[in-house]
Amino acid sequence: MLAVPLVDRINKWVFNGIAVIFGLAALLTLVQVFARYLLKSPFVWSEELVRYAMIWIVFLGTAVALRKGHLIAVEVVQHLVPKAIKKMMEVVTVLINMVLLFLLIKYGFGIMTNLGGQSTGAMDIPVSWTYAAIPVGSLLALLNSLVALFEIFTKKEEDKHGGDLVL
């Protein structure tokens, strides 16, 4: 399936983007602390920007982590059941995730539409830009779920769990 390398490439770009955003948010937080406590003149917009950056980091990071199987899971039951039942449980889990992601996409776009006329307090940017993290991250997670579902049916057991988050 040609989509798997494409999704992996998208995840690599997203992961690198997350790293840049996280680094900038950390740097901005340090600058904010310096300005607030040493210069006694805080930036009013910096806390808001860091907060919104963290929202995007969480939603995009969750999507990438989903693809690599690095989200928290309770796997005790899967280790106790036969391989055929284990595979069925994995499929059901991915399908339930996909339904929940579809709902996040649907209601995320609804939230964005409802908040279309509002802007943030300090930076005066549309609030919908912040809430766009919900459907964008969920779309990426849904795409990664489709690839994970494909891999459940095509990969051998030892291939699925080997490997780190090397992007």
Image: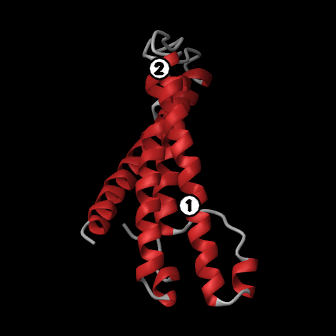
Q: Residue at x 51, y 61 (%)?
A: 66
> Where does label 2 land, which residue?
113
Element under disc 2? helix
Q: Quadrant of residue 85?
A: bottom right
Question: What amino acid type should be assigned to the residue bearing mark 1?
Answer: Leu
Q: Quadrant of residue 73?
A: bottom right
Mark 1 vs mark 2: in front: 1
Residue 68 visible to an observer of this rendering: yes
- Out of 147 and 9, give the one closest to the viewer: 147
Q: Residue at x 53, y 15 (%)?
A: 44
Q: Position of residue 135 (x, y in %)?
A: 47, 38
Q: Position of residue 23 (x, y in %)?
A: 44, 45
Element under disc 1? helix
**Looking at the image, is mark 1 or mark 2 earlier in the sequence?**
1
Q: Residues within 10 Å of mark 1 (few under 14, many from 20)?
A: some
| Spatial separation of the CA atoms under disc 1 and disc 2 | 27 Å
* Total labels drawn: 2
Q: Residue at x 49, y 83 (%)?
A: 162
> Where does label 1 land, which residue?
95
- Check the image and report above or below for 101 versus 68: above
Please state if 93 lies on the left or on the right of 153 as rendered.
right
Q: Position of residue 51 (x, y in %)?
A: 56, 31
Q: Position of residue 4 (x, y in %)?
A: 31, 68
